[in-house]
Image (cartoon, grey):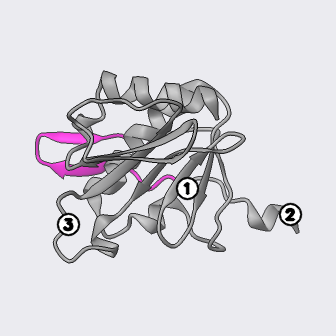
């Protein structure tokens, strides 16, 4: 019964963004625990090739960190350890004219004042959520990877 709630990542094949770039599928040991029964990240991002490619890029980086759980809900894909530390969501689900294909939100234990953040919110004393608009998987660069690692370390 328990296994029916845990889904392994199926291989959707490479994501073709344009004729010059292909992002290979990510093989990972991440555990998927969908909040929406049966929904996998590939299902959530099925209508947005850029968002799927960003997910695959983020997952490739996070898979190097060891244990990372991925949870899919109706509104986002969450990356967790003991608690959530990063979230990918589609602004088009909430906004009429979204400014990005996908938003990567990262929870840090401090405020980061980088100009790359679209918005930073401070919901608790030692908790800041930083929102990064992403329009291309190449925007997940060394700086973003460092933020993801920092978030994962405190989760």
Please indicate, yes or no, whether residue 120 appears anywhere in the rendered image.
yes
Dividing the picture into quadrants, the one containing residue 44 is: bottom left
The residue that disc 1 covers is 10
Q: Is 103 displayed left or right of 125 in the figure?
A: left
Q: Distance between the residues labelled 2 and 3?
A: 38 Å
In percent of width and height, residue 21 lies at 18, 40
Q: Which of marks 3 and 1 is nearer the N terminus?
A: 1
Crowding around mark 3 (Cα neighbors within 10 Å: few <14, some 14 to 19, many 20+) is some
The residue that disc 2 covers is 2
Q: Is 141 inside the magenta-drawn segment?
A: no
On screen, residue 86 above or below 63 = below
Q: Residue at x 30, y 30 (%)?
A: 113
The residue that disc 3 covers is 98
Q: Which of marks 2 and 3 is nearer the N terminus?
A: 2
Q: Is 86 displayed left or right of 54 in the figure?
A: right
User: In the rendered view of the protein, which quadrant contains the N terminus?
Assistant: bottom right
On screen, residue 94 above or below 15 = below
Q: Residue at x 68, y 58 (%)?
A: 33
Q: Residue at x 61, y 57 (%)?
A: 71
Q: Is mark 2 on a helix, strand or loop?
A: helix
Q: Is mark 3 on a helix, strand or loop?
A: loop
Crowding around mark 2 (Cα neighbors within 10 Å: few <14, some 14 to 19, many 20+) is few
Q: Is 74 displayed left or right of 154 in the figure?
A: left
Q: Is mark 1 on a helix, strand or loop?
A: loop
Which residues are drawn in magenta? Answer: 11-25
In percent of width and height, residue 77 lies at 50, 57
């Amino acid at each position: 019964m328990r296994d029916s709630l845990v889904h392994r990542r199926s291989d959707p094949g490479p994501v073709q963004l344009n004729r010059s770039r292909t992002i290979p599928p990510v093989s990972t040991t991440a555990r998927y625990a969908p909040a929406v029964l049966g929904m996998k990240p590939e299902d959530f991002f099925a209508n947005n090739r850029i968002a799927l490619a960003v997910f695959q890029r983020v997952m490739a980086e996070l898979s190097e960190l060891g244990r990372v759980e991925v949870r899919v809900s109706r509104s986002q894909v969450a990356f967790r350890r003991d608690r959530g530390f990063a979230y990918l969501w589609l602004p088009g689900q909430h906004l009429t004219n979204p400014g990005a294909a996908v938003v990567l939100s990262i929870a840090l234990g401090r405020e980061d004042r980088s100009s790359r953040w679209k918005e930073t919110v401070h919901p608790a004393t030692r908790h800041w959520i930083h929102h990064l608009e992403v329009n291309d998987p190449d925007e997940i660069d060394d700086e973003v990877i460092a933020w993801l690692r920092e978030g994962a370390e405190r989760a």
